Amino acid sequence: MASLDDIRLDISVTLGETTMPVHQLLRMGRGAVIELDATEDDEVTIMANSMPIARGAIVVIGNRIAVEVKQILKRATDSR
């Protein structure tokens, strides 16, 4: 069990995307809002170490945002 303490895992979820000029980004201050091309109702992909592992939904409660796991994706089989 001690060896599990040494495993690094990067988890990421993309909520949406946007495009803006760098000069506009540099002018933004703390608390600035960036509008994305997605809504809270859109499905998201949950990534672990840059590999898709699950699909989920965004949950907004008050000023908190969470991701609810809806489906675990099957692991890609190795075709060697």
Image: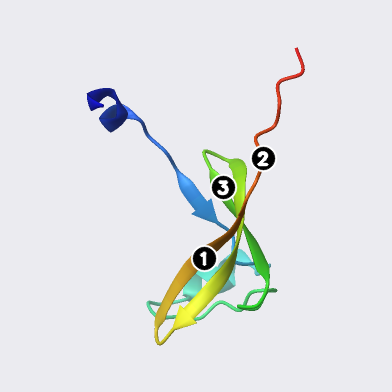
Type of residue at label 2?
Answer: Lys
The quarter of the rendered structure image containing the N terminus is top left
Type of residue at label 1?
Answer: Glu
What residue is pinned by disc 2?
74
What residue is pinned by disc 3?
47
Whether residue 36 is situated above or below residue 11 in the rendered picture = below
Name the front one of labels 1 and 3.
Answer: 1
What residue is pinned by disc 1?
68
Instruction: State the image coordinates of residue 18 (x, y, percent, origin top left).
Output: 67, 69
Instruction: State the image coordinates of residue 24 (x, y, percent, origin top left).
Output: 57, 73
Circle on res. 53: none
Q: Earlier in the sequence, mark 1 or mark 3?
A: 3
Residue shown at 55%/71% (left/top)? 58
Residue shown at 65%/45% (left/top)? 73
Using a 10 Å C-alpha cutoff, classify the residue at mark 1 as few (fewer than 14 neighbours), some (14 to 19) or many (20 or more). Answer: few
Q: Is label 2 in a helix, a strand or a loop?
A: loop
Using a 10 Å C-alpha cutoff, classify the residue at mark 3 as few (fewer than 14 neighbours), some (14 to 19) or many (20 or more). Answer: some
In whole angstroms, how far apart are the C-alphas of marks 3 and 2? 13 Å
In whole angstroms, how far apart are the C-alphas of marks 1 and 3? 13 Å
66 horizontally vs 14: left or right: left
- Residue ranking furthest to the left: 2
Answer yes or no: is residue 17 visible: no
In whole angstroms, how far apart are the C-alphas of marks 2 and 1? 18 Å
Q: Is label 3 in a helix, a strand or a loop?
A: strand
Name the front one of labels 3 and 2.
Answer: 2
Using a 10 Å C-alpha cutoff, classify the residue at mark 2 as few (fewer than 14 neighbours), some (14 to 19) or many (20 or more). Answer: few
The image quarter in which residue 63 lies = bottom left
